[in-house]
Amino acid sequence: MCGIVGYTGPRDAGPVLLDGLRRLEYRGYDSAGIALVTDNGDLFVEKRAGKVAVLTDALGGGPPSAGIGLGHTRWATHGRPSDLNAHPHSDCTGRITVIHNGIVENFRELRDELVAGGHTLKSETDTEVVAHLVEDAYKGDLADAVRVALGRLEGAYALVVMHRDEPQRLVGARLNAPLIVGLGDGESFVASDAAAIIAYTKRVIFLADGDVADLTPGTATITDRLGVVVDRPIDIIPWSAEAAEKGGYAHFMLKEIHEQPAALTAAMTGRLRGESVRLEELDGIRTRLSGIDRVELIACGTAYYASLVGAALFQDWLGVPARSTVASEFRYSPPPIDARTLVVAVTQSGETADTIAAARLAGDRGAVVVAVTNTVGSAITRESHASVFLQAGPEVAVAATKTFVTQVATVVMLAADIAHQLGRLPAETERDLVGALRRLPEQAERAIELSVAAEEIADRYASAAGFMYIGRSFGYPAALEGALKIKEISYLHAEGYAAGELKHGPISLLDAEVPLVAIATRSAVYEKLISNLMEGKARDARVLAVATEGDDQIGRLATDVLWVPDTIEPLSTILAVIPLQLFAYYVAVKRGRDVDQPRNLAKSVTVE
Ligand code: G6P
């Protein structure tokens, strides 16, 4: 979704904003813009369709010197990507500028009203109405005017507003879209996430829905929409600026694939005790957990595939019905939910609108809600009774990698912890699980080493017309996620399918141009999977198998093999996906794609 950054203080604002936009670009990248109140007191705006680099080129020798400004990188919702629709947007007087992430749902009605009132709106965006509403409400105090304007808005927003005549002041506001305030020494920042400002300060305030932040250099006053001051804690961002740099890798995605062993270690830190799994974050809700009789997991995209592993284990270990549903479907067709339902919301960003809405609905109906997220302070944590963090560090590439494997590891630990609490997890199962979890980081490292063949194999498969990925049981989520990686970054069609379903339709797609990718790791359903693999082979499809080291028959059956170490079945999804991530990465590179910022996507989607 869109990226937002604002600065007021003694530094030259232009470079701070452009640096922030480059770091935020993964949120959306179809256009970018900045607005500054220059040292001469003029309002300067430059905005361009395209990436931040296009904006930087347009700025030629650099932006004019200024101590305050706003920057925005866009993922279009209303109005196609164009110079005109790029943010910031201004009012009729050209004194007020606004940047926005979210959707003003009643913008048509507001637009008609503003036009009838004599305003001229230039763009097709929903955002521009905000600038004009603030213009109407402005009586010499920007924060007051913003609060009045907010009263007219329906929908979701993270907004930052600047007025040329108050050249040290930024006013930010949030509702259902992320916004944080950064506190520096005599300077203030506002941004959609910490990546934009971590190089300057680690001290942040996570704004809550309904908050309005009134910022001057070094001061931050947070109020509600009526102007009543509210107290918000200052948090310290636990990661360094370097964590969000490429560190010598060609792409963030490649770096993040290689970070997976360390991310898995971090995800398990403090959670494995002797031969048990223990998530302290659940201690406040133990009484409620003791009564659950059903588990519903909700998530979107990659997180949904990770949640499938959780659903299987909750059902197996707790012996209660458990399933995962994509949040956008759950929300409009919810299952029965009551106080005995555990709802687990899995979301890397913690800001995905569909997941948040589904979690809220579940909470309203009495469920106990647990968030599994990578983002401390994110919106999902406020919808949940307990939050379990992935501890994976920042993920910048749009295609998720290390957050997938840590999501799987974390939902496995969550299911184990709760099953243990309920006395339903046999000690031996838990001991085996803990042992396998402890070996996992090293095995992930080995899976990366074994995938050295992925680049050369990708070379031979990169011109395929499409791919069919199949898996069974815990191999199925790996097939889904492997196919999604290909789709996201190479723009080739790839289908992830339950292997047993291959014969019920999709097998007709297979031929010499459409390879079959089979997750054939050691499992109770291995032989069945091999039968499905043979069905594909008989249709002239090349077969790329992901198999367990030591499997001495697969080499005869598959055209190519990507090897992974052996582990227990519930963790096999994690290891199987690693070569598939690397395969997708190299296919995309061979096809000349923009790996870290694939077309049409955004890392977190804060609209429904
Ligand atoms: C977007 C991203 C996906 C991600 C999904 C859910 O579509 O492009 O990579 O899986 O959102 O994101 P979340 O932050 O909720 O895990």
Image (cartoon, rainbow, N blue to C red):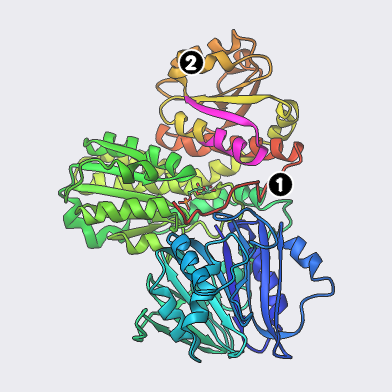
Which kind of residue does numbered mark 2 sit on?
Gly
**Secondary structure at numbered mark 1:** loop
- Farthest residue, direction right: 61
**Secondary structure at numbered mark 2:** loop
Answer whether residue 238 is visible to the viewer in this image: no
Which kind of residue does numbered mark 1 sit on?
Asp
Start and end of the magenta stretch? Answer: 481-497
Residue on which disc 1 sits: 594
Instruction: Give left or right: position of 40 versus 219.
Output: right
Q: Which disc is residue 505 wearing?
A: 2
Upstream in the sequence, badge 1 or badge 2?
2
Instruction: Give left or right: position of 197 versus 304.
Output: right
Give neighbour class at mark 1: few <14, some 14-19, many 20+ (Cα, 10 Å): few
In the displayed structure, would residue 188 be above or below residue 75? below
Query: How much space separates mark 1 and mark 2, taking CA atoms?
Result: 32 Å
429 or 172, nearer to the observer: 172
Q: Give percent across and percent down for residue 366.
A: 19, 54
Residue at 59% from the left image edge and 50% from the top image edge: 398
Give neighbour class at mark 2: few <14, some 14-19, many 20+ (Cα, 10 Å): few
- Farthest residue, direction top: 538
Q: Give percent across and percent down for residue 198.
A: 59, 72
Q: Give percent across and percent down for residue 555.
A: 62, 17
Residue at 48% from the left image edge and 43% from the top image edge: 301
Answer whether residue 250 is visible to the viewer in this image: yes
Instruction: Give left or right: position of 194 versus 355.
Output: right
